[in-house]
Image (tube, grey):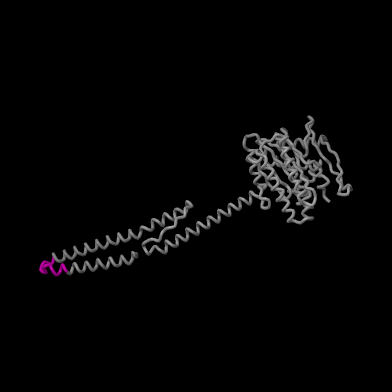
Amino acid sequence: MSVIRWSYAWVVLMATVCMAANAAWLWWSPLDQRLTVLGGVLGIVAVCGALTVGGLMLLVRYAKAPLRSFKTQIRALSDRQFIELQEPKVSEWVTLSKALNVMVARVQMMLTERDEAVDRMKRKAGQDALTQLASRQRLMEVMAKAVRHEGPGGAVAIFRLQDLDGLNKRLGRQRADDLLVAVATALNARLLLDKQAAEAGVLARLNGSEFGLLLPPYEVEALAHLLAAMSNTIAQLSVDGLADVPLVVRIGATSFRAGEEASDVLLRADAAVGRAEFEQKAMVISQPSPKHHTLAVAQWRVIIESALDNGHLSHAFYPVTDGEGRVLHQEAFLRLKEPHGVIYEAAEFLPPPCAAAAPWSWTCALWRWAWPRSPSRARR
């Protein structure tokens, strides 16, 4: 229905009726009574005008009805509601209605694509692309929540595969990637066998050769049993032919209490891995030291400066050899002693930042001096 055409037709109809009524009035009215004739004509014109205006108002009201639907459709977009309207009966609004339906469909498609992109980004940020395990960032977020809330704490373990670079050179990157995927699958499968760990544990890939595991509180014996089983599972992969040499994994673990910093907990676990490598052990489990949590940076500064001034340091030299047994250089293991006899290991006051900090910074040099590497990790 075209409102404009109906409006034209109504106006023409009213004009015709008005002219016909005036003609009839002039034909039947007495000509000598001019006032009566004039009054009748004016009355007919007024009635026809009122009918014309009334009809046009009804047509406009009818034509405005689809506008309410358009308004509702557009407002619904702000609430992420996508309404598709039927084609209106007023032909003047058909084009606009189709355009609005197309716009709503495109907006819905754009928002859907954006939501999918955001979900992909979240999954990418919280998931390792190769192994499909949680990422380091995800592990740190979960650990930060665990240490913030008052509770029993938990445990963190780091698994570090030895000689991954050498395996990569010998077998190629694809075989090394396949091995990492197999290690991740094996660790995850073994984790699911432990009910307590499966319910609250988070397994993540920290970097190229390291995997991290966040666990609920465990007794030392139970934790050691679980980690030993996971280590044996990894070692079995070389028997299955996924590696050309027996896989060796060093494990460092530590428990933590509520109120600690997540970075400190992970640092303590990393130091335990370094100790396992240095002592050629499969696993080292360290416990949080009460003194470690109560000392601030300023207090560490006083203790370290006092130890340097008063000679409260103990160290021992260890030779570092290459694969053929030749001595490459000497490295020193440093310990800091308080006057009261308390001994701090290097991991408590020096982070292992050589990978992140400048390699030749004084902190990195101090770390190399304070925490010697095992021969397998020595620079060639």
* Residue furthest front in the image: 240
- Asked if one can make out residue 129 in the rendered structure from this viewpoint, the answer is yes
Q: Quadrant of residue 158?
A: top right
Along the horizontal axis of the image, is 99 left or right of 280?
Answer: left
Residue 61 placement (x, y as % from top left) = 33, 58
Q: Quadrant of residue 18?
A: bottom left
Q: Is residue 25 magenta?
A: yes
Q: Is residue 44 magenta?
A: no
Residue 93 placement (x, y as % from top left) = 39, 62
Q: Name the one closer to the observer, 137 or 131.
A: 131
* Residue furthest right in the image: 326
In this rendering, the answer to whether 351 lies above or below 41 is above
Along the horizontal axis of the image, is 358 left or right of 37?
Answer: right
For the N terminus, the image quarter is bottom left
> Which residue is located at x 84 percent, y 38 percent?
315
In this rendering, the answer to whether 306 lies above or below 233 is above
Q: Name the one closer to the observer, 178 or 303.
A: 178
How many numbered marks, from 0 up? 0
Q: Name the one closer to the observer, 232 or 268.
A: 232
Along the horizontal axis of the image, is 61 left or right of 318?
Answer: left
Residue 214 placement (x, y as % from top left) = 67, 41
In this rendering, the answer to whether 243 lies above or below 193 is below
- Asked if one can make out residue 268 in the rendered structure from this viewpoint, the answer is no
> Which residue is located at x 72 percent, y 53 percent?
178
Magenta part of the chain: 24-35
Along the horizontal axis of the image, is 21 left or right of 230?
Answer: left
Residue 25 placement (x, y as % from top left) = 15, 67
